[in-house]
Image (cartoon, rainbow, N blue to C red):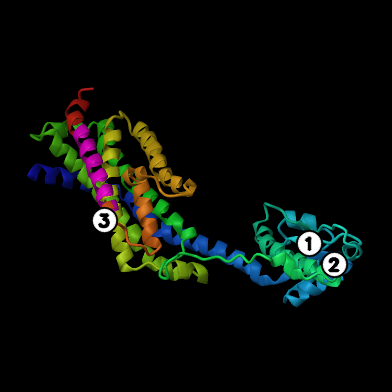
């Protein structure tokens, strides 16, 4: 035990010496989630601002007096679009889509002829694109009103269009939270954990091998398991510290959210933080063991960095499968590291209780993965310096 502690302290001290890299990792863990939430908040505010602007930019609106009257009755203002509206949309000087009304619109409509309205916007102009949905909704309501008025003028009851009344019955619990953009937060947490321990894992194995400092360590009376546990313990400590700091950064992040809808959605309390740490800390330990095992097979720092970056991409992108799964989650999701943790964190964000079985399965998988990787490191540690 004394040998393991000595190796652990030595590796942790070495990791602390590279203060620039360590500070970058720790500050990234503290700032990543607040920055992500600020970006989400800004985007949602821009979308809502377009919906609340209640202004329609139009061309030739006088050709449709009934449409003009309908828009004004909905509390909107109508402004004439500039003649060079296409160029201004492309250059982002104009931040609203433009409604084009064709000539003889009102006359054709009164004669029951099919007419069309055109909405012009530039897909690269996101501000203008945000205004597309409220404008289309406004025009859909006008189309429905025009159809009803047309039937009434011809002596036909508009109720024939509404013989079937469709109602929605949501089965959500009263205390269930809505999760939209905050569903991306588990991906951010897992990515922070993967990056947090990566550089320490590389430096303590491939880095020492490249510097030639691994051979003197082998001259000490320690066995492979003691070396493996000591080195892994230092890497896992840093990775867990990153997980802890990232979860704690959720609390000040709530103060930075300016959007009311996002603030109502993102309600993160102490019990949620405990649940997140219960899920993330075993994963951080398992990922650290995998990173140490992969780095030990490399002969140079750069080779280890490339392999760990591939591992980071696989682990971070694996939870994306949850986005493509539209039905019930397959059973194997609970047995797959990073996917299982993302699934449980999403349950926490929704205000749902995480099942004991799910936690036990995830813990079992992480322990098995950690023990397997440490066994590989212990067996290889003595032979690696001879290669």
The CA span between labels 1 and 2 is 8 Å
Residue 335 in view here: yes
User: Looking at the picture, how far across and down is residue 289, in whole percent?
Assistant: 25, 41
Chain-order first, disc 3 or disc 1: 1
Query: CA separation, marks 3 and 2?
Result: 62 Å
Name the residue nearer the viewer: 231 or 173: 173
Q: Which of marks 2 and 3 precedes in the sequence?
A: 2
Kindly indicate the quadrant of the structure image that contains residue 104: bottom right
Q: What residue is shown at x 36% (from left), y 61% (from top)?
A: 348
Image quarter of residue 277: bottom left
Instruction: Label 1: state its secondary structure.
Output: strand
- Asked whether the residues under the numbered discs 3 and 1 touch, taking CB atoms below 8 Å apart as contact, a structural biologist would say no
Mark 1 — residue?
Answer: 99
- Tell me, yes or no, whether the two marked residues, 1 and 2, touch with CB atoms within 8 Å: yes
Depth order, front residue of 290/174: 174
Q: Position of residue 307 (x, y in %)?
A: 37, 34
Magenta-drawn stretch contains 364: yes
Residue 213 magenta-highlighted = no
Secondary structure of the residue carrying tag 2 is helix
Quadrant containing the C terminus is top left
Q: Which mark is residue 356?
A: 3
Residue 61 got which mark? 2
In this view, the mark in front (3 or 1): 3
Callout 3: SS: helix
Q: Quadrant of residue 252?
A: bottom left
First in sequence: mark 1 or mark 2? 2
Residue span colored magenta: 358-377
Image position, residue 46 (x, y; %): 60, 65
Assign the N terminus to one quadrant of the image: top left
Tally the numbered discs: 3
| Residue 363 at x, y percent in the picture | 25, 48
Question: What is the crowding at mark 1: few (fewer than 14 residues within 10 Å), some, or many (at least 20)?
Answer: many
């Amino acid at each position: 035990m004394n040998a393991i502690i000595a190796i652990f302290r030595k590796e942790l001290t070495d990791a602390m010496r590279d203060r620039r890299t360590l500070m970058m990792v720790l500050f990234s863990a503290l700032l990543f989630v607040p920055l992500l939430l600020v970006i989400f908040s800004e985007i949602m505010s821009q979308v809502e601002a377009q919906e609340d602007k209640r202004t329609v930019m139009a061309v030739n609106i006088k050709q449709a007096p009934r449409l003009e009257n309908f828009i004004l009755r909905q509390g909107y203002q109508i402004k004439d679009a500039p003649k060079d509206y296409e160029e201004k949309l492309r250059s982002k000087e104009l931040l609203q889509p433009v409604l084009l009304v064709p000539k003889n619109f009102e006359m054709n409509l009164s004669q029951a002829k099919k007419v069309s309205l055109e909405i012009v916007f530039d897909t690269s102009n996101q501000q203008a694109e945000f205004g597309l949905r409220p404008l289309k909704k406004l025009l859909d309501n006008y189309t429905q009103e025009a159809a009803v008025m047309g039937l009434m003028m011809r002596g036909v009851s508009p109720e024939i269009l509404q013989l079937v009344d469709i109602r929605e019955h949501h089965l959500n619990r009263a205390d269930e939270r809505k999760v939209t953009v905050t569903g991306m937060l588990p991906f951010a947490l897992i990515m922070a954990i993967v990056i947090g321990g990566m550089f320490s894992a590389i430096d303590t194995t491939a880095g020492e091998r490249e510097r030639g400092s691994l051979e003197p360590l082998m001259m000490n009376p320690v066995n492979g398991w003691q070396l493996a546990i000591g080195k892994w313990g230092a890497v896992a400590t840093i990775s867990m510290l990153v997980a802890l700091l990232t979860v704690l950064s959720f609390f000040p992040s709530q103060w930075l959210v300016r959007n009311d809808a996002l603030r109502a959605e993102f309600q993160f309390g102490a019990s949620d933080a405990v649940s997140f740490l219960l899920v993330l800390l075993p994963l951080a330990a398992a990922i650290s063991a995998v990173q140490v095992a992969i780095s030990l097979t490399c002969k140079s720092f750069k080779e280890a960095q490339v392999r760990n970056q591939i591992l980071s991409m696989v682990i971070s992108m694996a939870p994306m499968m949850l986005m493509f799964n539209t039905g019930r989650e397959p059973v194997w999701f609970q047995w797959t590291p990073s996917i299982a943790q993302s699934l449980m964190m999403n349950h926490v964000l929704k205000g749902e209780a995480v099942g004991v079985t799910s936690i036990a399965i995830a813990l079992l998988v992480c322990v098995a993965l950690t023990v397997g990787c440490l066994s590989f490191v212990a067996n290889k540690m003595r032979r690696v310096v001879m290669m």
